[in-house]
Image (spheres, coloured by chain):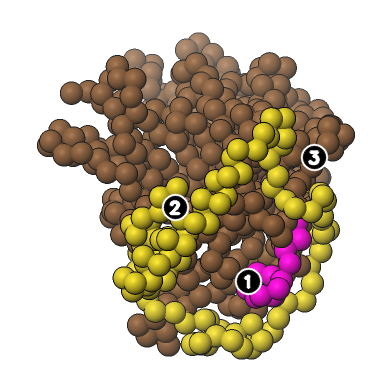
Chain colours: A yellow, B brown
Amino acid sequence: MNITVADVEHVARLARLELDPDEKSLFAGQMDAILGYVEKLKGVNTDGIVPTSHAVPMENAFREDLTRPSFSIDKALANAPDRVESFFRVPKVIE
Amino acid sequence: MKYQPVIGLEVHVQLKTDSKIFCGCSTQFGAEPNSQTCPVCLGLPGALPVLNKKVVEFAIKAGLSTNCSITPRSIFARKNYFYPDLPKGYQISQFEDPICQHGWLDITLEGQESKRIGITRIHMEEDAGKLVHADVSALEDGSGVDLNRACTPLLEVVSEPDLRTSDEAVSYLKQLHRIVTWLGICDGNMEEGSFRCDANVSVMPVGSETLGTRAEIKNVNSFKFVRQAIEYEIQRQIDLIDDGGTVVQETRLFDPNSGTTRSMRSKEEAHDYRYFPDPDLVPLVIGDEWVERVRRELPELPEQRQQRFINLLGLPLYDAGVLTASRALADYFEAAIAAGGTAKALGNWIMGEITRTLNDTGTTIEMCPVTPVRLAEMLKLIDNGTISGKIAKTVFDEMWKSGKKPLLIVEEQGLVQVSDIGAIEAVIDEVLTRESGQVAEYRSGKDKLFGFFVGQVMKASKGKANPALVNELLLSKLNG
């Protein structure tokens, strides 16, 4: 693997993280080491093994289509940093 | 240069469940903002989503009805992106192994061979919340977020890029709309967003094998807008290329007011959703038994019913299409057939008077005050000569108002058709005597006046004279 600063910047942007130049090169090195370690797994023979999507050997957990009481509006908005009437308020989103 | 448009559609079908896809909050439309939320759909830490079984059932129904194969083991994935209407920072969707794959629908345009449109996949996912910008003045320069819609169950139906014209796209969309409403899995209300469409549009030189760069058009929420948006976008791309420009891959928003599309800068960032299996939701395993049970329980589908109406009842394609526009309408028609009506006459009444009166009164066919049996009874009265087609309109209006049996209305109001030759002749004589001047003109060659005499006789008989007899007797008297 060879994780560059550009890769770190891309991932940081997707995660909405602001990093200074020192952090970028620090994380590039760390991520490179982690991915390099994972890279080793490629050496294992996995012929005939179905890719694992879940760690728990379980399937089909359902609920029936029944409604249950919801939060009150006040409760739903209790943690809102900004509230107007019954809405969460966020900075204007322009389409 | 001549260009070939290439169109693929992604349709979001909102499922008609009582509760949301991963929690027990109500899906009722139009409730007060943020009154239908809980820790799961608010994305609070530690909340665990649990799959609504009915969503799976509905997805299998949709898949089987669009000739898809049902994936024996499918999984849910997280689609990661930030947007204020998405509380968790990811949408639970399906990426690899969607529940339905490799289907198709046949579309038939008037006067053309039917054409098969491929369906790549159908997957289940949760809807996002709703952003409110302008309607609430107290928001001032901010946007409001209503999370009632968050976690509402959706099916996304993705077509192959097999569509070539806006007509084909609309026809495919109507076909799909008819199926999901027919199955009762979606209310089909496009204004409320229960059936929404994104269109992928590109153009390539005629004869080319390589697809052009496509633009994805969002926010087309009526059949009319789909047509407008696609036609505008095709022309925009052709003009751009002819002027030496190139089409860029981007998301564009349709503006219904201007009928144009414009670039959405908010979606400019390259799509990098980093899908991965959602560890909160275990794999979904659907055995043959489940699939076969759903298949057995499927109703006769609109396409099959339309074919049956054409083949067995001899209806033209157009009539059969209109009469299978909804399951309730087709049921109404068949109930009237069962009550003894003839297909063509019933079809004409249903497509004409009934549809018109339903529209005028804002009623649905389910609530039609004239029952199929009453309609069939009335047509029998026309067939056996008791009333004329003209009088039938009066009887029909009265049935609509009072719900009475047609024969009773005819008797009460004295509407029985007069087929007594002597009585009709008497009326004709009276009219011809009164209109002697016109009679002379007619006899000197002004044939057009015949209709005038028919009208006068019908009027004098208060519409009750048998029109066929009136014609016959008038002709012999005038020419004799």
x and y percentages locating residue A61 in the rendered image: 82, 55
x and y percentages locating residue B100 in the rendered image: 66, 37
Within-10-Å neighbours for mark 3: few <14, some 14–19, many 20+? some
Mark 3 vs mark 2: tell me if same chain: yes
Within-10-Å neighbours for mark 1: few <14, some 14–19, many 20+? some
Q: CA distance from mark 1 to mark 2?
A: 21 Å
Q: Which residues are magenta?
A: B38-51
Q: Which residue is mark 2?
A: B272
Quadrant holding the N terminus of chain B:
top left
Q: Which residue is mark 1?
A: B43
**Residue B149 left/right relative to A92:** right
Q: Which residue is mark 3?
A: B286
B376 or B49, which is in the foreground? Answer: B49
B465 shown above or below B233: above
Label of residue B188 in the image: none
Q: Amino acid at mark 3?
A: Ile
Q: Quadrant of residue A7?
A: bottom left
B100 or B111, which is in the foreground? Answer: B100
The answer to whether the residue labelled 3 contacts the one labelled 2, judged by CB atoms less than 8 Å apart, is: no
Nearer the observer: mark 3 or 2; the answer is 2
Within-10-Å neighbours for mark 2: few <14, some 14–19, many 20+? few
Along the polypeptide, which appears first: circle 3 or circle 1?
1
Q: Amino acid at mark 2?
A: Asp
x and y percentages locating residue B404 in the rendered image: 79, 49
Tag 3, which secondary structure?
loop
